[in-house]
């Protein structure tokens, strides 16, 4: 039951951070033809989860509660893969095939690079 509370707290914080980033991205990139806020939250979330996983595997022990809070709650609430799926579908349905392909490339391809980079950073000094 304790883990569920930590996940709920982390999820609320992550979703709030995601909303703030989406608002900020909308101010910086007002053209809504590419959902830049979701892209940014997913790439940042991928980097963070890789970084934390690398740290946790190497030199710092994370309790089960902390892991639940960080990985499931905070980062689960912050990243928006379900939103990514819907937004890609909407780009495709609207005829934005090029945007959809570019969006998938960045979300998946660059997201994986961000996870690997974060992981490598987290393992440094281990």
Image (cartoon, helix red, strand yellow):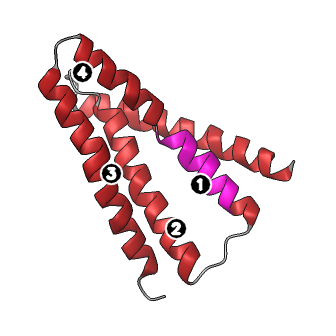
Spot occupied by residue 19 in the image (x, y as percentages of width and height): 47, 32
Q: CA distance from mark 1 to mark 3?
A: 16 Å
Instruction: Check the image and report above or below for 89 versus 42.
Output: above
Q: Kindly identify the residue that appears in the image at 15 percent across and 22 percent down.
A: 97
Q: Which mark is residue 12?
A: none
User: Label 4 belongs to which residue?
Assistant: 32
Identify the magenta region: 67-79
| As drawn, 50 above or below 121 | above
Label 3, on which residue? 111
Q: Residue 73: say if magenta.
A: yes
Determine contact: label 1, label 2, CB under 8 Å. Answer: yes
Circle 4 crowding by C-alpha within 10 Å: few under 14, some 14–19, many from 20: few
* Camera-nearest residue between 46 and 98: 98
| Prevailing SS of the magenta stretch | helix
Give the structural element (helix, strand or loop) at label 1: helix
Q: Position of residue 46 (x, y in %)?
A: 41, 53
Q: Nearer the viewer, residue 119 or 25?
A: 119
**Mark sitting earlier along the chain (4/1):** 4
Task: Mark 4 vs mark 3: give the one in front.
Answer: 3
Residue bearing the label numbered 1 = 71
Q: Are marks 4 and 1 in contact (CB under 8 Å)?
A: no
Task: Specify the farthest residue to the left.
Answer: 98
Q: Quadrant of residue 119?
A: bottom left
SS of the residue under disc 4: loop
CA separation in Å, label 4 and label 3 = 21 Å
Element assignment for label 2: helix
Note whether 47 is above or below 59 in the view shown.
above
Q: Residue at x 66, y 61 (%)?
A: 67
Percent position of residue 91, x then y: 25, 19
Q: Which mark is residue 53?
A: 2
Q: Earlier in the sequence, mark 1 or mark 3?
A: 1
Instruction: Specify few, some or many for label 1: CA neighbours under 10 Å numbering under 14, 14-19, or 20 or more.
Output: many
């Amino acid at each position: 039951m304790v883990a569920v509370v930590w996940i709920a707290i982390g999820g609320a914080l992550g979703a709030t951070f995601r909303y703030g980033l989406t608002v900020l991205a909308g101010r910086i990139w007002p053209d809504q033809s590419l959902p830049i806020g979701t892209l940014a939250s997913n790439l940042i979330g991928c980097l963070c989860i890789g970084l934390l996983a690398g740290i946790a595997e190497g030199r710092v022990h994370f309790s089960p509660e902390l892991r639940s809070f960080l990985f499931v709650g905070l980062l689960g609430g912050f990243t928006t893969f379900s939103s990514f799926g819907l937004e890609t579908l909407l780009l495709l349905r609207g005829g934005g095939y090029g945007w959809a392909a570019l969006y998938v490339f960045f979300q998946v391809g660059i997201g994986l690079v961000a996870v690997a980079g974060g992981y490598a950073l987290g393992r440094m000094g281990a």
